[in-house]
Image: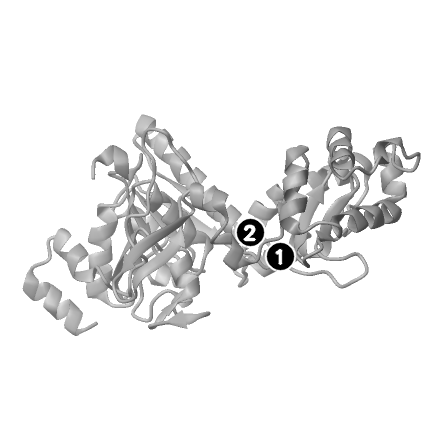
Amino acid sequence: MADEERGPLVGLTVLDTATMLAGPYAATLLGDLGADVIKVEPPRGDDTRSLGPERGGERAPFISVNRNKRSIVLDLTRPADREAFGKLAATADAVIANAREPALSRLGLGYEQVREHRPDIIWVGVTAFGVDGPYAGRPGIDFMAQGIAGLVALNGDPDRDPVRVTVPLVDVMTSLLVVSGILAALHERAKSGKGQRIDVSLLDALVHAQATGLASLFLTGETTPRTGNRSYYFAPSGVFECADGSMVCITTPSEKFFANLSDALEAGWTDDDRFRTIELRLQNEDALEAEVAARCKQYSREELLERLHAADVLAAPVNELPDVLRDPQVLHNGMIQTTQHATLGNLDVTGVPLHLGRTPGSVRRAPPVLGQHTEEILRELGYAVAEIAELTKRK
């Protein structure tokens, strides 16, 4: 495969020493774009290798965010393995880490320690709340960041307890910031010849994403309430049941889309004094929502969506996850890819979400089994067969 067909980051080497989701997923995205990503795992493996649904010894959380990587097992508490890591770091362009202190330094993964092996290294540390400050050093994951940054309080129905967002969106947003930081630092290094330390936290990623809600607070002192599937700014907006029992999402963020909905359902709502403006629709939201629900119940989901889309209405099916795998647009976009796993055979993974016209990324490798490429990588570092055998014997 030509370099252009493998992606724009061919020639870049990234060491993924992180565990769980945010750090490893950032490394995966870099691998999607052509980087050689080497996942450095302890003998027990990444923590996600022991979590969640399992088949053939492989776990879903690990499979989900570790394609396009090679795996090497190094016990960084042992001098010989620390030496191997140093040789590996000397060949790398970037390192991603998320261990907390003092474990980070004890394993030789701190910025200054890695910089001894390659002075112009780009080093990214991923933390839950920040590298210093009152919460520094606390354990934390996506859920904790959601709580502190106000997302849990905003999510769910207004008359029920708040609910966390179950999709790990904070981890995913953080991973995108890690990638952005590395690419920015690479651009700067090309001019200065210098590497640098980058720190990214789940909390900062989510506070940044809360810009809309915080803007209301900054501007008016108003706190955005929990609204469930409704919108705080316009109506109608929600999930509605069809005649066949399936559900659709419908939303109307402007007069244009409300008029389109009214026309599509032949409802005449634009001439109804209760619904003439956004403000009136919000005041009469219960009545309007009841009318929309009654109209939707007259059609199967397929019939309703065909009618709504023909009228340029913002509408979509409420798909279950198996439906997503069959969705024609998801398939057309290449977001489901089949790989050849070392032990499982055919294994589907998600595709590359960034579509570059001339140098597209691709899914080239299945998620690795633990230590799958250890010998291969050690050979590349110049280790002799006997040295590799000795390291392997000592695990």
In this orientation, which residue lies closer to the viewer: 164 or 214? 164
Q: Secondary structure at mark 1?
A: loop
Which picture quadrant has residue 34?
top left
Circle 1 crowding by C-alpha within 10 Å: few under 14, some 14–19, many from 20: some
Residue 353 rendering spot, x and y as whole percentages:
44, 42
Which picture quadrant has residue 74?
bottom left
**What residue is shown at x 70% (from left), y 44% (from top)?**
250
Q: Secondary structure at mark 2?
A: helix
Query: As drawn, which residue projects farthest toward the top?
Result: 191
For the C terminus, the image quarter is bottom left
Mark before the other along the chain sequence, 1 or 2: 1
Circle 2 crowding by C-alpha within 10 Å: few under 14, some 14–19, many from 20: many
User: Position of 98 compared to 291: left or right?
Assistant: left
Q: Which label belongs to residue 379?
A: none
User: Position of 105 compared to 209: left or right?
Assistant: left
Marks 1 and 2: CB-CB under 8 Å?
yes
In this orientation, which residue lies closer to the viewer: 273 or 7? 273
Q: How many marks?
A: 2
Residue 160 rendering spot, x and y as whole percentages:
78, 63
Residue 44 rendering spot, x and y as whole percentages:
33, 71
Q: Amino acid at mark 2?
A: Val
Return the residue at label 2: 170
**What residue is shown at x 48% (from left), y 45% (from top)?**
328
Q: Amino acid at mark 1?
A: Val
**Residue 199 appears anywhere in the view:** no
Residue 212 rendering spot, x and y as whole percentages:
69, 39
In this orientation, which residue lies closer to the viewer: 253 or 213? 253
In this orientation, which residue lies closer to the viewer: 271 or 289? 271
Q: Which label belongs to residue 165?
A: 1
Spatial separation of the CA atoms under disc 1 and disc 2: 9 Å
**What residue is shown at x 42% (from left), y 38% (from top)?**
354
Mark 1 vs mark 2: give the one in front: 1
